[in-house]
Image: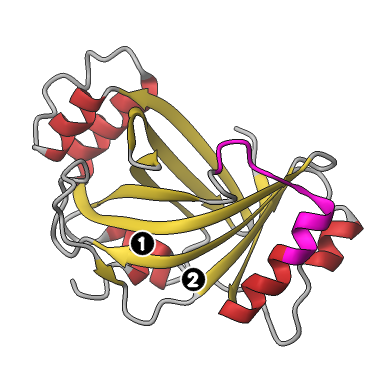
Amino acid sequence: MIFRHEWKHEISESDIITLRHRLNAIARTDEHAVDGKYEIRSLYFDSLSDKALREKLDGVNIREKFRIRYYNRDTSMIHLEKKSKVGGLGNKASAVLSKEEAQAIADGDYSWMMGSGRPLVQELYSKMMAQGLRPKTIVDYTREPFVYAPGNVRVTMDYKIRTGLRCTDFLDTECVMIPAGDAPAILEVKWDEYLPDIIRDAVQLDGRRSSAFSKYAACRIYG
C-alpha cells in the first residue's frame, strides 16, 4: 500500500481567486476537468454507531472510510473507493462499479457483492456484515484540480459543499441537496516523495494553517 503526503487548508473565496491565478501559471488543469472544474458526487458509508464520523472528530490517527463516487453526472464511470489515513499520509484504493451495481447498493441489495471477484467490493461487503456499514449520506461539491508532474503533485480547491440529508440514492437526480451549513472552501495538496518549492510557495496564504476539515463530517451536520 503506497501512501501520499496530504495537506489540507480552509480557504476563502478571495483565496480561491489568488490560488487560481498562481496555479494556472505553473501547473496544468486536470485533463478530466470541464472549463477548469468538475462536479463530484459521493455516497459515504458509516456504521450504525457512526464509527467513521467519530474517528474523524476524535482525531484517531489510523482510520478508513468507504465511498462510491462519480463525476460530472456521468454514471458510465462509477468507482468504489476506500480512503485510508495514517497521520498526515493518505492512500486510496479503487474498484469500478457498474451503474446497476451502484444502484443495488443504494437500494440495499448486497447479495451479489461477495461473488463480484473484486477484492475491494468484497472487503466492503465483509465490513457491511461485520461492522454494519451502510450508505449514510450524499456529498456534492465543485472541484478545481491542478497537477504538477515533479513530485506527482495534485492541488485541488473544493467548494459549494452540499449534503443530501438522509437521501442515500445518489443516482437519483431529484434528490434534494442543500448547503452543508457554513462549510468553507478547502485547499488540498497531495504529493509523493517531495513537494517542489514552486508549488509550496504558490499555495502559501497568510493566516492559513493546516486543517482537519472533513466534507463528510460537514455533511452530517443535520444528522
Task: Name the quarter where the C terminus is drawn.
Answer: bottom left
The residue stretch that appears in magenta: 21-33
Look at the image and say whether residue 30 sits in the magenta stretch. Answer: yes
**Residue type beneath disc 1:** Tyr
- Is disc 1 in contact with disc 2, using a CB cutoff of under 8 Å? no
Name the secondary structure under disc 1.
helix
- The image quarter in which residue 2 lies: top right
Q: Where is residue 201 in the image (x, y as percent from the top left)?
A: 86, 67
From the viewer's side, name the closer residue of 135 and 146.
Answer: 146
Compute the Cα span from label 1 to label 2.
9 Å
- The image quarter in which residue 12 lies: bottom right
Q: Where 154 falls versus 179 (above or below)?
A: above
According to the picture, the residue beneath numbered tag 2 turns out to be 213
Residue sticking out furthest to the bottom:
207
According to the picture, the residue beneath numbered tag 1 turns out to be 216
Look at 76% across and 58% down and name the residue there: 23
From the viewer's side, name the closer residue of 57 and 73.
Answer: 73
From the viewer's side, name the closer residue of 62 and 13.
Answer: 13
Q: Where 131 falls versus 109 (above or below)?
A: below
Look at 51% across and 55% down and name the residue there: 143
Q: Where is residue 138 in the image (x, y as percent from the top left)?
A: 26, 54
* Side (left or right) of 42 relative to 25: left
Look at 22% across and 19% down and name the residue there: 114
Q: Residues within 10 Å of mark 2 (few under 14, many from 20)?
A: some
